[in-house]
């Protein structure tokens, strides 16, 4: 049988996990951010260096680099879709979609 006032084994105000969860990076994103924020020998961080490489690739004509830069700076282009309905056409904007704008019959 569990003790304590609550019947769950803990006194009111007492944590069931007093030491908390494990410390440190837990996800790929937090681990990448930690690395990207580190300074190099010349005082820049790795994020700056990655951006410089990306910009140089875009300037050399790399379309994927250009697309990535534009998506990060201005956001993905909004794609408009026209849905034909009995009570009138409806336009739907889908951010970041690569669906082509053409009529869709809904009924």
Image (cartoon, rainbow, N blue to C red):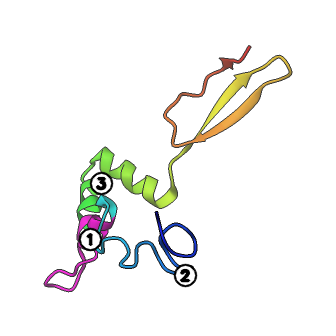
Q: Is residue 50 visible?
A: yes
Closer to the eye: label 1 or 3: 1
Residue at x 51%, y 66% (from the top left corner) = 8
Element type at marker 2?
loop
Residue furthest to the right in view is: 87
Vertical placement of residue 89 versus 30, above or below = above
| Region of the chain picked out in magenta, as a range | 30-50
Q: Earlier in the sequence, mark 1 or mark 3?
A: 1
What's the distance in space between the residues labelled 1 and 3, CA to CA?
Answer: 21 Å
Q: Nearer the viewer, mark 3 or mark 2?
A: 2
Residue 36 is labelled as 1
Which residue is drawn at the image coordinates 38% and 75% (left, top)? Answer: 20
Location of residue 37 in the rendering, given as x and y in whole percent from the top left corner: 28, 76
| Residue bearing mark 2 | 13
- Dot 3 corresponds to which residue? 58
Which numbered disc, 2 or 1, marks the residue that appears first in the sequence? 2
Residue 54 occupies which quadrant of the picture? bottom left
Name the residue nearer the viewer: 69 or 25: 25
Q: Could you give the CA–CA distance between mark 3 and mark 2, rounded to whole angstroms? A: 57 Å
Q: Give the percent coordinates (x, y) of residue 87.
A: 86, 21
Return the x and y of residue 79 as percentages of the image width and height: 58, 38
What is the x, y in percent for residue 23?
Answer: 30, 75
86 above or below 6? above
- From what the image shows, is residue 32 above or below residue 97? below
Classify mark 3: residues with Cα within 10 Å, few (<14), some (14-19) or many (20+).
some
Q: Residue furthest front?
A: 1
First in sequence: mark 3 vs mark 2 = 2
**Which quarter of the rendered picture does the C terminus lie within?**
top right
């Amino acid at each position: 049988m569990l003790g304590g006032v609550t019947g769950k084994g803990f006194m009111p105000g007492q944590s069931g996990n007093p030491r908390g969860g494990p410390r440190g990076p837990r996800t790929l994103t937090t681990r990448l951010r930690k690395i990207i924020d580190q300074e190099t020998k010349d005082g820049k961080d790795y994020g700056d260096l990655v951006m410089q490489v990306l910009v140089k690739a875009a300037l050399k004509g790399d379309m994927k680099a250009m697309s990535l830069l534009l998506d990060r700076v201005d956001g993905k282009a909004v794609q408009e879709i026209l849905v034909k309905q009995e009570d009138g056409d409806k336009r739907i904007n889908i951010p970041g979609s690569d669906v082509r704008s053409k009529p869709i019959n809904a009924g």
